[in-house]
Amino acid sequence: MPRLILLLAIAAVVYILWRRIQALPPHKRRNGYIQLGLGVLVIIVLGLSLTGRMHWLGAALTGLLVAGRQLLPLALRFFPMLASLRSKAAAGSGQTSTVESTMLRMQLDHDSGELSGEVLKGRYAGWRLQDMERAQLEELMAHCASEDDDSVQLLDSYLQQRFPGEGPFQSNQPPPGSHSTGQMNRSEALAVLGLDDSATPEDIVTAHRKLMQRLHPDRGGNDYLAAKVNQAKDVLS
């Protein structure tokens, strides 16, 4: 009887953890499943070892496997060579601009012109826009409309690119030139242009020109993001 109660308790805990993983943003679920799987493996190995059905060496090897999986991120931090290799790999992924509002963080790839984004607040906090279906994005748009106009403009920019010719995505389109740009500090301006603190005036001009080629309304771009890029250049000039 005690064993049955213990098994039921373990099953209940595993089910609760599985449900929590299901509630995570899609791109975070894989790591959650791995963690849960390792936990179940440890429980099974401990159970077999305590009942004499597995040699202690097998349990020790399983423990080392789990510990190695958990300590790998720390190893990348503390070993400079591994950290530098990871940084170089990240650096090769291309230059991006970042624009952030109350609800969203949007990134623009300078080479491809593709937009990607992450939800910062609300029901879908932590979700990537590319992982969301059309109905979910429309629900998010309705929520943004009640919270923040800048978030509406950012999401509309993404939707226009992902679903070309299927708009409008806003029920009430603001008149041209009425977009809120808000105050922007130097750090935000550098992020918008995809630059760092070492950027020279020439770097700023080059980044601005390249982005405007992608975003200028006369070239089929997005007027809200173009306004952000112009504002960033003004802040840094």
Image (cartoon, rainbow, N blue to C red):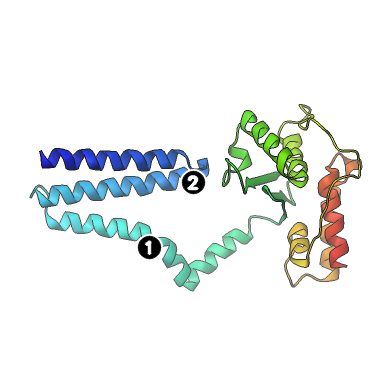
Q: Amino acid at mark 1?
A: Leu
Q: Mark 2 against mark 1, which lies toward the viewer?
A: 2
Look at mark 1 in the image and give the residue it sits on.
71
The mark nearer the N terminus, 2 or 1, is 2
The quadrant holding residue 130 is top right
Q: Position of residue 120 (x, y in %)?
A: 62, 49
Work out whether residue 153 or residue 182 is closer to the camera in this orientation and state it.
182
Residue 78 visible in the displayed image: yes
The residue sitting at 60% across, 43% down in the picture is 122
Q: Amino acid at mark 2?
A: Lys
Work out whether residue 180 or residue 187 is closer to the camera in this orientation and state it.
180
Give the distance between the C-alpha atoms of the residues marked 2 and 1, in whole angstroms. Answer: 18 Å
Single out the residue that lies furthest toward the left: 52
Q: Is residue 206 left or right of residue 129?
A: right
Check the image and report above or below for 64 versus 219: below
Single out the residue that lies furthest toward the top: 166
Q: Position of residue 81 (x, y in %)?
A: 49, 71
Q: How busy is the neighbourhood of tag 1: few (under 14 within 10 Å), some, or many (20 plus)?
A: few
Q: Which quarter of the rendered picture does the C terminus lie within?
A: bottom right
Q: Position of residue 140 (x, y in %)?
A: 65, 37
Q: Give the secondary structure at mark 2.
A: helix
Q: How busy is the neighbourhood of tag 2: few (under 14 within 10 Å), some, or many (20 plus)?
A: some
Look at mark 2 in the image and give the residue it sits on.
28
Q: Position of residue 32 (x, y in %)?
A: 41, 46
Q: Give the secondary structure at mark 1.
A: helix
